[in-house]
Image (cartoon, rainbow, N blue to C red):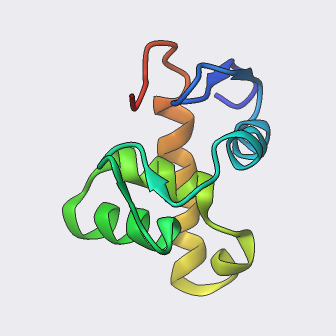
């Protein structure tokens, strides 16, 4: 699926790779606001990871992928979760109509 058009879940920005979507998200939409829960959090990546893993929310899996720093995801279980979040993001962000807001 990599190479297909992917869309930003906030503004609909188009990109061909998850790397570009993540870069766009961090440059244009990064703050401590969760667009899914409509609340501010001290650590948005921590909130996204905990909500995804404890409640199974796929929207938060994508938010985790977009906001987590790669250094958090090196080795061990963290990298497995990061990879899974990326796989979920590839599927859901390829839908032009997928939006959080």
- In the displayed orientation, state which residue is furthest to the front: 40
- Looking at the image, residue 76 lies above or below residue 63: below
- Looking at the image, residue 84 lies above or below residue 72: above
Of the 4 image quadrants, the one containing the N terminus is: top right
What residue appears at the point 59 percent right and 55 percent down from the top-left corner?
Answer: 31
What residue appears at the point 43 percent right and 22 percent down from the top-left corner?
Answer: 98
- Foreground: 93 or 84? 93
Of the 4 image quadrants, the one containing the C terminus is: top left
Residue 99, horizontal then vertical, whole percent: 43, 25
- In the displayed orientation, state which residue is furthest to the top: 96
- Foreground: 51 or 40? 40
How many numbered marks, from 0 up? 0
- In the displayed orientation, state which residue is furthest to the left: 55
Residue 72, horizontal then vertical, whole percent: 65, 79
Residue 91, horizontal then vertical, whole percent: 49, 32
Q: Quadrant of residue 68?
A: bottom right
Residue 27, horizontal then vertical, whole percent: 77, 45
What residue appears at the point 43 percent right and 54 percent down from the top-left corner?
Answer: 61
Task: State left or right for residue 17 relative to residue 56.
Answer: right
- Looking at the image, residue 14 lies above or below residue 55: above
- Looking at the image, residue 25 lies above or below residue 2: below
């Amino acid at each position: 699926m990599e190479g297909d058009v992917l869309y930003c879940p906030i503004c609909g920005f188009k990109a061909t790779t998850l790397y570009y979507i993540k870069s766009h998200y961090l440059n244009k939409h990064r703050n401590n606001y969760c667009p899914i829960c409509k609340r501010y959090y001290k650590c948005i990546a921590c909130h996204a990871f905990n909500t995804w893993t404890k409640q199974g929310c796929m929207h938060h899996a994508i938010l985790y992928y977009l906001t987590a720093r790669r250094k958090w995801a090196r080795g061990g279980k963290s990298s497995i979760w990061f990879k899974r979040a990326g796989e979920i993001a590839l599927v859901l962000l390829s839908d032009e109509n997928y939006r959080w807001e």
